[in-house]
Amino acid sequence: MDYTLFYPQFGSFLITVLAFIFCLSIIVFVHEFGHYFIGKLSGIHAEVFSIGFGPVLLSFHDKKGTKWQIAAFPFGGFVKFLGDKNSASVPELEINSDNQIANHDRASMHGAPLWARFATVAAGPVFNFIFSGFIFFIIFLGQGTTKIPLTVGELFGMPYETKLRQGDVIVSINNIPIEKDFNELSPDLIRALSISPATYIVERDNQLIQLNEIIQNPPRIYQVLPKSAAIASGLKIGDVILSINFQQIDSFEEIKGLVESSEGQSLNVEFWRKGVVKVTTLKPLKVDVPNSKGGFESIYRVGIVGGHFPFDPVTERQSLGQAINSSIESVYKVMEGSIKGLYHILFGNISSCNLSGPISIAETSGQMVKQGGLSYLWFIAVLSTAIGLINLFPIPVLDGGHLMFFTCEAVLGKKLDPRIMSSFMTIGLIFLVILMLFALFNDFFCP
């Protein structure tokens, strides 16, 4: 048997596993460090800081007596504070001689003031959001924004010649002048960009030149989405679709139309990659996508994204203010999209297959690594925001459950009975296990 046949599969599997472990571990570290750091500032002593669960692989004690450890199963982590019975922060029941629950030490989680406990628990998700915002900030700062006037940067490799040259300044497209920021396209310009071939007026060497027959919306892949038909078929960024089912493709919109009308039937695809023509088979998958009414609709997709031009526009660096604003907007959009998605799943508006488990997340992390460091960083930021948001749900065991208990304490003016809290924790844990099993079921049986 030729065992070298297994090397690519093994290498791909190893990349996926390592990418997932690194991604999850850094997100968990940030989350738990938020609890630890704010707890320390609030006067609450942390006994254990753990990345992962199960048997301890590596550990040491710091000068304050906190045990820092890495455990065998990297599917989470915890900070065990003084007075916690377990990693879920269930209080230890200390009964005094009068058969009453004893007061905890001020340095314990359950003996600290309400404000300190609330801040310490809330800090985990907040640190996740800050971490996501920082990653988005770095990405936006590095990517920049489209320079105005619109200027041709890198020309993409295409199976045909283009009349454009690097450095050309685009003055107008189909007689519509290019004036505004490209983040705010006017209706007239949107219509002009939809017409291909197009007529461009460009400034080159201080002269205005008219260029005809410029291909817009080329059938070139600008982005490949994870867990998609395109990924499964081996398509990559930069591939140019030449034909689908032997029908010539001249624009990206034609791909969209053929996929949506496919009814899920396999499509024979001929594509161009770095001067070589190749063939593959695409089987469109039905996915739930947002519509203009705020809901969702099920449409066949193959998981590729196109662009307006056969070139990358020249960009200029964003200001710090712009990058900060863009990063905050990105965190908000991830949170908004997650909440809307869960809402529509709960009310049956979209398929429950949109709820992914650890296997799907691991698979996605591996695919993002293969698409480049920027895609992987973006994925980490999105996942960090999602994990922070989920932890705020008012489910016992999660941070949101603890915050719910603290809110009840503030309203009632006294602490809840630890035995009642322990019972709710058990119910919350059972609910989470069922939810995780359901997500794992989706990983195996959803397309």
Image (cartoon, grey):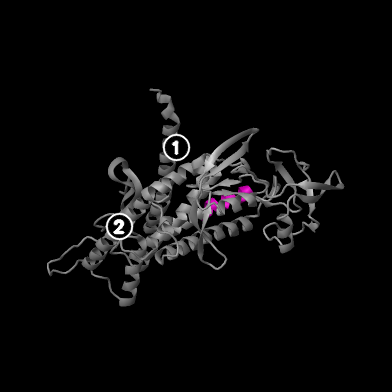
Say left or right for 24 vs 242.
left
* Residue at the image point whose x is 50% and y is 49% from the top: 379
- What range is drawn magenta here? 133-143
Q: Check disc 1 and report the residue beneath it.
A: 15
Task: Residue 434: give its label.
Answer: 2
Is residue 48 located in the magenta-colored stretch of the structure? Answer: no
Tag 1: amino acid: Ile
Q: Which one is nearer the viewer's eye here, 276 or 175? A: 276
Check the image and report above or below for 322 versus 252. below
Q: Position of residue 268 (x, y in %)?
A: 56, 42
In the image: residue 251, left or right of residue 3? right
Residue 76 horizontal/vertical position (percent): 35, 50
- Whether residue 335 is visible to the viewer of this picture, yes or no, is yes
Which residue is drawn at the image coordinates 62% and 34% (left, top)?
Answer: 277
Which residue is drawn at the image coordinates 56% and 54% (left, top)? 261
Could you say which is closer to the camera, residue 140 or residue 8?
8
For this orientation, the residue located farthest to the top is 1
Tell me residue 411's x, y (percent).
Answer: 33, 76
